[in-house]
């Protein structure tokens, strides 16, 4: 599998390793963290959740794909399906407007249950996907995602068919409504930060390193004593848990879930987000998600302003995605870094020639 | 067939490696046919043979990269024929690859660290190793042993060919190997690098046996005590280095097709 | 065949019993008890026929997909878009000229042309980078879908069945026996049968072309072992373009077929892409007979499932895929 094109500069940047967190040395990272923390002071309710909350949620789901694809070489198109499954389980086990379906468990039981089931679901899917290698993964995971979508459409007993489940209850704890804008934003931010740092941390831990070894050369990993498929399945389990977290936040965000939330198009959107942002580093999916959400929210107005049909949002997304795949091996991060390198090189090379 | 193999199979149960009737087919092609051989613990042996003789396939069968189509393989008395590769490795078998099989996206240190981790516990550990991690020390030591300390933080993709070959050997020395298979470790090395290689091989602890595939007779015969000659997937002669060196048939076959 | 029975006697036995049971269900007059248990025989026979003819359609789509993958390792996730495009072109032509046959010809040519352009302008530039190619096909699928939505809108289109194919035919399958003792025969739409026969003919023609012509041999050798291609010294690029054109053209034809006995609308691209995926996963990547077998299995599973267990029909299809992946990950008829 020719993933090398996608992960080329992966570890070069993370060299100060094993000890501290490399990003703690980066002033830009501190700035971003600060902005994210004081965001409620800057952005109004609409922006806070519709733009930044959604970005972080999609980023979490895409992060789970980044983990599998960037470190494991497994491009899974079912990450959104796993998230959606978790969302459905929150609705089914918890409280919703569809009393005939929902079991009415309190959120602190329903949520862990949903996460566990989503992790099992994703792990089983992964166990199926690792039966074959390389590009087959995409096909099998896409088929799993599609099967789930059609199933939710057909099945009324659990998933309530194409109407889905509405008015899903959200948690109220310590007298706070965690779905009101500001607390919900901080909740999302906390989960996103947790997932981000977990992935970052694990990537340098034995498990993550071994996964990158499997990505680079599975046969050699077996010849070093690793059970390669077990590692792959474990990676799916870890990624499924992350995707499940994203799914729980997603269903709390919209308070409803229906087959439309787990459609094939949505699954592909997650891939687009991860690839556009950059699939070699955990920050990539979040950047991709921000671009995606901004495009989705404002494309209509912008397109109309340019005298174009406002409905052509997907065309824009498709073309943008194609452009990124054509010109960058590592999404916008890759483009950015290439640009920075060129900036850094051109003055120094002119200086060099003056010396000579 | 009868000479060394028989004498050695008398030791039977104590053998490090014992192959019986190992055959490997690729479709209609028999890459290995009915190979029987026994290697003592600590024994150092060369496998010689022209290109396509089946030497690499022999290694692949022993490690389980490609399991044999028929026959049995015992490793220190245990029947490992149906074991997946990682089970054999965890029992002390190691190998290198003719074409370097490294992890180009990782640093030299990470490559070696993975090799150390693969044969110890905690392969699935979610905790980063601390400063005093024993495996980190083992890693440092190994990196030093193959003279790669100056480049230990470089990605493997950026290494020179000779350095990659060194790293290839380091990966096979991780943990506590009991038996190592070297597949043409000297291929593409400069004369100086060859000397380093010979030094590494001869300084291995005496209890570690190995089989080395090597086209360069000068290298091969300096580091082994016995020789197996292969041709067309079969073992056709076994003996001591000087017997092989002076054997006209072996000379002709080997020199005839070996140096392509 | 004989080797399969020799190697897997248990599976062979199960398969033989299943086929025998199916034949009995199709040909026998059902005893009343059976009709009570699982419903009318006419319903069952209709589901079987629908399943097989749907399988014919799936085969047309999936054979191109599997051929392109087998030879070029290109997982063309825009294959469904080619299908949909073929459907729209066929609709436009048949509405304009009134000729059903002509719509096939034009749809084949138009979609084949798209395939040629894709291969020459896009995929040739990234040969051997299968992941990148797949990403590109995903991007293309999105772009195509939106372009077609732009041009044709969200409506459903149905291609007019030519008058000489309209109406049912009577088939020599007894669905029931009247109280007078007179047998009732199955009535089935002519056009579906015609299309099924056509897809069988296309399948056989492809098989012959692959097995009996020089270029077919080259393609087959290339599917088995890609390095051979370079060694034969043929113009690989020409072969690639031809295969891409053929595979895309077949998807175009399938679009006209699908537009005739179902309908075309946005979303059908995804549906048929997924059908192709499942068919080739089940049948075996790169194998034309595998695509045929997989198509019939999936077609039957879908139709029987939607008649007998409507809320779990998709699960049947999916379980078949899971079973194949678990027992024979390379697919039923793939070599290796
Ligand atoms: N994976 C494989 N698939 C098909 N044929 C193989 C494979 N590996 C080796 N062979 C064939 O087996 C024979 C022996 O190869 P090999 O063991 O690599 O020879 P050697 O290492 O002695 O040069 C050769 O004819 C080679 O083409
Ligand atoms: Mg060799």
Image (cartoon, grey):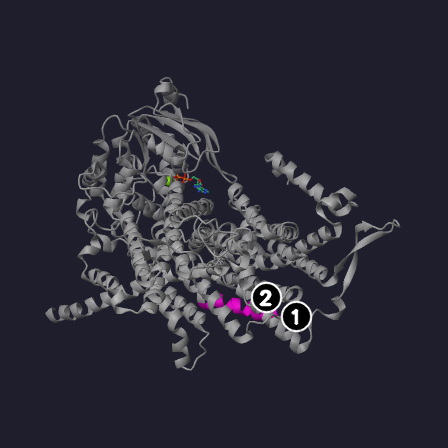
Asked if residue C219 lies left or right of residue B22, the reply is right
Kindly identify which residue carries mark 2.
Answer: C252
Asked if the stretch drawn in magenta spans residue C114, the answer is yes
Q: Quadrant of residue C104?
A: bottom right
Residue found at x 72% / y 53%: C43
Asked if the stretch drawn in magenta spans residue A316, the answer is no
Q: Position of residue A250 (x, y in %)?
A: 40, 58
Q: Give the range drawn in magenta.
A: C103-121
Residue C159 marker: 1
- State whether residue A138 is above or below residue B35: below
- State whether residue B43 is above or below residue C166: above
- State whether residue A314 is above or below residue B196: below
Asked if residue C34 lies left or right of residue B98, the reply is right
Q: Where is residue B224 in the image (x, y as percent from the top left)?
A: 28, 29
Residue in front for this viewpoint, B160 or A163: A163
Ligand 1 shows up in the quarter that is top left
Asked if residue C69 lies left or right of residue C255, the reply is left
Asked if residue B228 lies left or right of residue A347, the reply is right
| Dot placed on the residue nearer the N-terminal end, 2 or 1 | 1
Q: Where is residue A275 in the image (x, y as percent from the top left)?
A: 37, 61
Residue B165 shows up from this direction: no
């Amino acid at each position: 599998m020719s993933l090398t094109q996608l992960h080329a500069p992966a570890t070069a940047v993370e060299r100060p390793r094993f000890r501290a967190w490399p990003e703690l040395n980066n002033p830009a990272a501190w700035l971003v963290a600060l902005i994210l923390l004081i965001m409620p002071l800057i952005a109004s309710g609409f922006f806070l959740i519709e733009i930044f909350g959604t970005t972080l949620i999609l980023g979490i789901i895409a992060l789970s794909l980044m983990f599998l694809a960037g470190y494991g070489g497994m491009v899974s198109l079912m990450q959104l399906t796993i998230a959606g499954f978790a969302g459905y389980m929150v609705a089914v086990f918890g409280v919703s407007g569809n009393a005939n379906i929902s079991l009415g468990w309190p959120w602190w039981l329903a949520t862990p249950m949903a996460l566990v089931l989503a992790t099992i679901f994703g792990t089983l899917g992964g166990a199926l996907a690792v039966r074959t290698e390389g590009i087959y993964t995409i096909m099998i995971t896409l088929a799993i995602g599609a099967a789930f979508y059609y199933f939710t459409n057909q099945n009324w007993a659990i998933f309530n068919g194409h109407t889905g489940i509405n008015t899903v209850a959200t948690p109220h704890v310590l007298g706070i409504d965690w779905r009101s804008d500001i607390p919900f934003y901080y909740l999302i931010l906390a989960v996103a930060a947790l997932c981000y740092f977990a992935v970052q941390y694990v990537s340098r831990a034995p498990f993550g390193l071994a996964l990158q070894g499997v990505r680079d050369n599975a046969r050699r990993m077996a010849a070093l004593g690793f059970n390669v498929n077990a590692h792959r399945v474990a990676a799916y389990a870890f990624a499924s848990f992350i995707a499940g977290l994203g799914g729980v936040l997603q269903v709390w965000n919209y308070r409803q879930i229906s087959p439309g939330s787990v459609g094939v198009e949505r699954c592909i959107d997650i891939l687009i987000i991860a690839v556009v942002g950059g699939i070699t580093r955990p920050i990539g999916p979040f950047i991709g998600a921000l671009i995606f959400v901004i495009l989705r929210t404002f494309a209509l107005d912008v397109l109309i302003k340019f005298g174009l049909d406002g409905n052509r949002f997907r065309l824009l997304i498709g073309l943008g995605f194609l452009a990124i795949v054509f010109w960058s091996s590592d999404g916008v991060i890759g483009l950015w870094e290439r640009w920075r390198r060129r900036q850094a090189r051109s003055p120094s090379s002119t200086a060099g020639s003056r010396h000579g | 067939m009868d000479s060394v193999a028989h004498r050695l199979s008398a030791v039977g149960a104590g053998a490090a490696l014992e192959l019986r009737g190992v055959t490997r087919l690729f479709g209609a092609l028999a890459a290995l046919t009915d190979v029987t051989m026994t290697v003592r613990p600590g024994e150092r042996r060369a496998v010689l043979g022209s290109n396509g003789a089946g030497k690499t396939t022999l290694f692949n069968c022993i490690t389980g990269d490609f399991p044999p189509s028929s026959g049995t393989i015992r490793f220190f008395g245990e029947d490992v024929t149906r074991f997946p590769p990682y089970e054999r490795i965890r029992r002390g078998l190691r190998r290198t690859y003719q074409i370097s099989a490294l992890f180009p996206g990782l640093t030299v240190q990470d490559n070696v660290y993975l090799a150390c981790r693969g044969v110890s516990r905690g392969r699935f550990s979610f905790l980063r190793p601390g400063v005093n991690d024993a495996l980190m020390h083992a890693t440092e030591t190994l990196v030093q042993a193959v003279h790669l300390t100056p480049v230990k933080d470089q990605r493997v993709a950026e290494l020179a060919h000779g350095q990659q070959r060194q790293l290839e050997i380091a990966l096979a020395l991780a943990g506590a190997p009991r038996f190592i298979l070297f597949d043409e470790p000297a291929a593409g090395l400069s004369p100086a690098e060859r000397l380093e290689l010979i030094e590494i091989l001869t300084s291995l602890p005496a209890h570690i046996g190995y089989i080395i595939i090597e086209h360069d007779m000068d290298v091969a015969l300096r580091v082994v005590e016995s020789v197996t000659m292969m041709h067309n997937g079969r073992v056709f002669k076994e003996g001591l280095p000087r017997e092989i060196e002076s054997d006209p048939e072996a000379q002709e076959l080997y020199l005839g097709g070996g140096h392509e | 065949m004989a080797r399969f029975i020799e190697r897997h006697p248990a599976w062979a036995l199960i398969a033989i019993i299943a086929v025998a049971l199916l034949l009995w269900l199709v040909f026998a007059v059902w005893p009343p008890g059976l009709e009570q248990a699982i419903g009318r025989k006419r319903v069952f026979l209709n589901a079987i026929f629908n399943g097989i003819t749907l399988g014919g359609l799936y085969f047309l789509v999936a054979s191109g997909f599997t051929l392109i993958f087998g030879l070029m390792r290109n997982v063309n996730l825009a294959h469904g878009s080619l299908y949909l495009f073929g459907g729209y072109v066929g609709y436009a032509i048949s509405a304009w000229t009134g000729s059903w046959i002509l719509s096939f010809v034009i749809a084949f040519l138009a979609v084949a042309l798209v395939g040629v352009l894709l291969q020459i302008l896009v995929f040739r530039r990234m040969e051997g980078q299968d992941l990148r190619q797949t990403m590109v096909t995903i991007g293309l699928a999105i772009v195509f879908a939106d372009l077609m939505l732009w041009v044709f809108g969200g409506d459903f289109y149905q291609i007019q069945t030519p008058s000489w194919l309209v109406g049912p035919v009577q088939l020599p399958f007894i669905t029931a026996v009247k109280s007078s003792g007179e047998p009732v025969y199955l009535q089935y739409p002519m056009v579906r049968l015609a299309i099924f026969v056509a897809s069988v003919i296309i399948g056989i023609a492809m098989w012959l072309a692959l097995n009996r012509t020089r270029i077919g041999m080259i393609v087959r050798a290339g599917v088995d072992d890609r390095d051979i291609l370079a060694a034969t010294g043929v113009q690989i690029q020409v072969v690639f373009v031809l295969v891409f054109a053929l595979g895309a053209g077949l998807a175009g034809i399938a679009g006209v077929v699908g537009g005739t006995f179902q309908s075309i609308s946005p979303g059908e691209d995804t549906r048929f892409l997924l059908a192709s995926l499942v068919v080739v996963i089940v049948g075996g990547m790169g194998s034309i007979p595998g695509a045929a077998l997989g198509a019939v299995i999936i077609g039957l599973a879908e139709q029987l499932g939607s008649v007998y267990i409507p809320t779990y029909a998709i699960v049947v299809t999916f379980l078949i895929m899971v079973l194949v992946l678990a027992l024979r990950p390379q697919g039923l008829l793939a070599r290796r």
